[in-house]
Amino acid sequence: MTAERYFHFTLGPVQAFVAQARRTRDFWAGSFLLSWLSAVAMKTVQRLSKDGRCIVFPLPDDDFLKAIEHGAAKDKEPKQGNIPNRFMARVPESFGIEQAREVESAVQAAWKALTDEVWKMDFAEHLSGEQLNKTEAIWQRQIPAFWDMQWIFTGSKADTGALDRRKNWRSHALPDEGGVKCGMMDGWQELSGVEKPNE
C-alpha cells in the first residue's frame, strides 16, 4: 500500500491585491484574475498527477476549469471567479519538487501571457523613445516578482495547518523599487519612471 501524499498550494497576495481596487469592477477583475491563476495551478496539478479528480479541497467548479482550459461558448463563459487562491491535492509519490516548480512555472507563464497583452494594448502603442524604455524596464522587473506562490507536501490531508506554517516563513522577496512609488499599489514604483515627484 502506497503512502498518502498531499500537495498544498496557495497564491497571493490576496488582501493587498484586492485592496488596490477603486471600483466594483476592479474588485470583480481582481477576484477573477486570482481564480483564473489558481485554476491554471489546479489544471497543471491534475495533468502532472494524471488524475482529473486529484483536488481534495475545495472541490473545484469543473465548468470553470474546463472554460479556462478549452474556452467556452459566449453564453457559457464564467461570469465570476469561484476558485479560491489555495487548494489541496492528493498526488502520487512521483509528484515532487520538480512538479511543484512546474506548477509555479505554469502560473507565471499564464500571468506573463496576460501581461504581454496588456503591455501591447496599453503601453507599447502609446509610448515611445526614452519614456517607453523607462516604463518597459520597470514593467519587466515587476511582472515576474508580483505573485507569491507557496506550497508544501504532507502525508495527511488532515494537516491543513502546514501551508499556513509555510506561509509564515515569508520567503517572497520583492524587487528593489526606486523612483516615485505608486499611489495605488503600495511599495511599487509607478510606471512613468520619474525619479522625484513633479518631474
Image: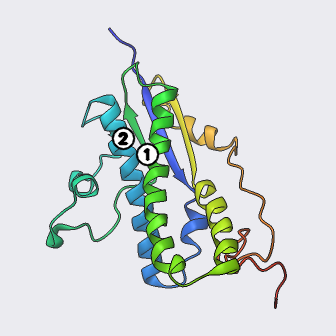
Residue 23 image position (x, y, % from top left):
49, 85
Q: Secondary structure at mark 1?
A: helix
Quadrant in the rendering for residue 156: top left
Left or right: 128 as drawn, with respect to 124: right
Pointer 1: residues within 10 angstroms few (<14), some, or many (20+)?
some
Write the residue at 49% across / 58% down.
Answer: 112
- Visible in this render: residue 156? yes
Q: Which residue appears farthest toward the top when viewing the image?
A: 1
Left or right: 53 as drawn, with respect to 193: left
Write the residue at 28% across / 56% down.
Answer: 68
Above or below: residue 87 compared with residue 178: above
Which residue position holds label 1?
106
In primary-sequence order, the first of circles 2 and 1 is 2
- Whether tag 2 and tag 1 are in contact, CB under 8 A, the answer is yes
Tell me the quadrant of the picture where the C terminus can be found. Answer: bottom right
- Please tell me which residue lies in front, 20 or 179: 179
Q: Which residue appears farthest toward the right when viewing the image?
A: 196
- Visible in this render: residue 55? no
Residue 114 image position (x, y, % from top left):
43, 64
